[in-house]
Amino acid sequence: MRQITLNLFLLISTFCFAQETDLKLKNVSDTILNQKRVLKVSDPLNGEKTMQKLFPGNLYHLSDKNTFISWKCKSCKPSSFVDVNGVEGDQMFPYSEGVATRLLANIDYSDSKGNQFKILVFNHSVHDEDGLQTGRFSGGLLGVAKFEKNSNVWEMKSFQPAVAAFGSFAQCPTPKLVEIGEDQFALSLVHANGGAGAPYNGYLYLIAGFDGKYQPLMEIDYYSLFNSISSEWSSTYTVVTDNNKKFFRDFKIVTKGSYKKAKGTEDDFEVDLPAELAEMAKTKKQFNFVIERHYSFKGKFYKMIDKPIVKFSNVK
């Protein structure tokens, strides 16, 4: 009896392992990249099922909540999309090796008139036979679909399969919704990356609809620093609502942290500093700081205006 039970356990384990590793690509039509596609989904909208309607590949549910759609488009003509890591160059999407698409976020919001919306955010990565996401300096390619509720039906109002790649190990950071004007909404995310054992530098990105497409409209460097023995900092942003701007309102970025001169060892080396701290670091060994910066939308991108306000404390 014990032998039969053991054999049954081994059989089940082998079957489960095969399910985890035997991932197949499904060829799909190039019509899935048509940004003028029409899609209506009955309420309640299920993010996972809707993702599969948009990218009708093979759906897999692996362990550790690793759910994705595996697909390939042989008839698609790949296009170039920026990977903000800037290490391995732009990403050509759809990938020739196949694509793994994951639901990154399902965001609900309403405007001032009570209209209800959903934004589905997707993460594309190169298909991996084991369902993994790899590549330290390869970002996850972000895609967006926006729906509006009409009676008991959600109608897709905009669809952009790919925008740009952010993050590391083919995993885009989860974006947050931010209101940047009257009934004008955008997505913010913090991209961070760094070498093995080295400090991670964070950048704030704002992604919004402009000129008929979603695109990054703001990039704030030195937004955060972590995984450093000597120094660290973090930031917060505030949308300025008192400047009478109806759309693309200004942003105030406040960065707080500490700096300590590194010892120059293998695990503790100097970090890249923003210009506002560089001069102080030349003569002082450590200090705390607060930097306030102001950004305004100019033409097609947010740019810093006025001179940053810097305050130092605990200077030694």
Image (cartoon, grey):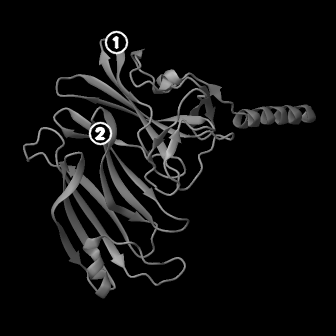
Residue drawn at the location 69% of the way across and 33% of the way down: 23
Q: Residues within 10 Å of mark 1 (few under 14, many from 20)?
A: few
Residue drawn at the location 25% of the way across and 72% of the way down: 276
Choose mark 2 or mark 1, whichever is in front: 2
Q: Is residue 130 left or right of residue 255?
A: right
Residue 82 point in image, percent of width and height: 44, 47
- Residue 112, compared with residue 251, is above or below; it is above
Extreme residue toward the top, this view? 151
Q: Residues within 10 Å of mark 2 (few under 14, many from 20)?
A: many
Residue carrying label 2: 208
Residue 245 point in image, percent of width and height: 10, 42
Query: In the rendering, which numbered label is found on residue 126?
Result: none
Decide if residue 124 is in sight here: yes
**Residue 41 falls in image quadrant:** top left
Task: Calculate the distance from the C-alpha at mark 2 to the C-alpha at mark 1.
Answer: 27 Å
Q: Secondary structure at mark 2?
A: strand
- Residue 127, compared with residue 196, is above or below; it is above
Q: Quadrant of the N terminus?
A: top right
